[in-house]
């Protein structure tokens, strides 16, 4: 009964959901005029990358997960504002909350690095951060599989 | 109105530990809160019925050694006789009614609240009853919270007990992550494991970037295939009127087109969000 997975819910949807969202975002990208120009490959790459992350966040559970929420928020901000809201401010405001459970400086160094990697990690306690990391890893690997499939399918025979 | 429950040796340590476990227990309590009273009682008896570890195990915390310490005190706390259940449950349900349902409970808030309750009780009653009241406070709410006995040779400081619980929560998560990340079980040190996890996340992200570069290079072929692919992921679903004229071609497409084979799991997703197109266009992707 006391299994380790019981309180941690890291269910990730099937591959279908990820493929659908990714393909939809790609087809939307295709409709943009600037997308198909032969030059400016870098912009295209960035857009595709952003599309990949956004569709992953959407497929993985939308706003139910902290990291997906942060990702979507970040993407929305990039559209409306030119300057991105720096992550550091976010972390400072969270530290001001002074949650007494977040001490332990030995762990915090490594947790810091993890916070930098996982989106939305700035405002989380360490144990919650690790839950989010686990789900994020699952979703990332699923997204990588989907993209790999796509590339393999499209590659010239 | 507090119930008099017999408890010995309760310390503030347990109180604070209770606070750290609030999140799990709050979830449980919220869950139980919506049950009708008889249902609540029955939940209670099943949780505590028979084994002393039942309730503790349902919270999911993996702290076996502390709880299974066999002293008479712990037995008194953990094992409940049936006649106590109804009386204590009446108290607990009353207690639950007192708390607002929409209470946003942070852990420190609850701790403060309970400390205030303790202090008020201590002021009102005589000093020789203050121990009882603190026991009562915890005893009455012991159904909600986990009690921890400090082991011999370990500090009974409230902070250290809370720290210990937190550390064990984190180690539990770490074990879960270890199962996810390949190659993590060969490293014994916690720092090394964290390094490995971080490297894995980084590598996954670089893989996404690399694959998106590849996709950008394959842009022309993507144009050609994209609509067919979107349809094939939903072989039996009519996405929109615009796709209707593709439907007769689907049978041919799914069987012959190599790019689509890796997507065909034969399962239709459970939910369909009509506004997902608008979301993507608003996000600019």
Image: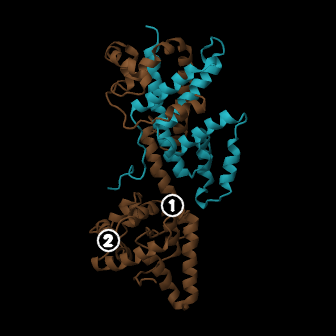
Distance (Cα) linking label 2 and label 1: 32 Å
Nearest to the eye among marks 2 and 1: give it. 2
Q: How many marks?
A: 2
> Which residue sits at x=32%, y=77%?
B86
Label whose residue precedes the other's in the sequence (2 or 1): 2
Give how far across and how far down residue A61 sits, in percent: 47, 41
Image spot of residue B281 (x, y percent): 57, 30
Q: Which residue is mark 2?
A: B41
Give the colour in which the image draws chain A: cyan
Element marked by disc 1: helix
Quadrant housing the C terminus of chain B: top right
- Residue found at x 52% / y 38%: B197
B159 left or right of B173? right
Residue B164 is labelled as 1
Specify whether A58 is left or right of A113. Answer: left
- Is residue A53 visible to the viewer in this orientation of the structure? no
């Amino acid at each position: 009964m006391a299994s380790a997975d019981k309180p941690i819910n890291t269910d990730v949807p099937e591959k279908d959901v990820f493929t659908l969202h990714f393909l939809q975002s790609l087809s939307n990208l295709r409709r943009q005029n600037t997308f198909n120009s032969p030059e400016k490959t870098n912009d295209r790459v960035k857009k595709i990358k952003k599309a990949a992350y956004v569709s992953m966040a959407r497929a993985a559970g939308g706003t139910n997960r902290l990291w997906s929420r942060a990702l979507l928020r970040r993407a929305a901000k990039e559209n409306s504002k030119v300057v991105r809201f720096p992550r550091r401010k976010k972390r400072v405001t969270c530290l001001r909350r002074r949650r007494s459970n977040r001490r332990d400086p030995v762990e915090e160094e490594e947790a810091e690095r993890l916070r930098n990697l996982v989106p939305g990690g700035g405002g989380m306690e360490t144990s919650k951060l690790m839950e989010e990391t686990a789900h994020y890893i699952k979703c990332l690997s699923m997204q990588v599989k989907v993209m790999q499939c796509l590339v393999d399918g499209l590659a010239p025979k | 109105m507090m119930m008099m429950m017999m408890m010995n040796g309760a310390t503030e340590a347990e109180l604070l530990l209770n606070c750290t476990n609030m999140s799990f227990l709050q979830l449980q309590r919220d869950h139980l809160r919506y049950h009708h009273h008889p249902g609540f009682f029955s939940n209670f008896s099943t949780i505590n019925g028979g084994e002393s570890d039942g309730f503790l195990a349902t919270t999911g915390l993996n702290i076996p050694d502390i709880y299974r310490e066999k002293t008479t005190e712990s037995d008194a706390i953990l094992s409940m006789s049936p006649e106590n259940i109804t009386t204590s449950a009446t108290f607990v349900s009353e207690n639950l009614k007192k708390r607002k349902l929409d209470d946003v409970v942070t852990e420190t808030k609850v701790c403060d609240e309970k400390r205030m309750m303790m202090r008020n009780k201590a002021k009102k009653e005589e000093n020789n009853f203050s121990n009882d009241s603190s026991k009562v406070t915890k005893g009455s709410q012991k159904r909600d919270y986990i009690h921890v006995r400090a082991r011999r040779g370990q500090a009974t400081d409230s902070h250290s007990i809370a720290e210990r619980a937190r550390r064990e929560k984190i180690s539990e998560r770490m074990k879960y992550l270890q199962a996810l990340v390949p190659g993590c079980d060969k490293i014994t040190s916690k720092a090394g494991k964290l390094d490995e996890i971080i490297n894995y996340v980084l590598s996954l992200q670089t893989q996404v970037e690399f694959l998106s570069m590849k996709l950008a290079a394959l842009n022309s072929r993507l144009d050609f295939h994209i609509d067919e692919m979107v349809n094939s992921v939903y072989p039996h679903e009519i996405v929109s009127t615009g796709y209707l004229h593709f439907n007769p071609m689907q049978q041919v497409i799914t069987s012959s087109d190599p790019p689509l084979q890796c997507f065909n799991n034969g399962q239709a997703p459970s939910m369909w969000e009509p506004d997902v197109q608008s979301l993507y266009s608003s996000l600019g992707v």
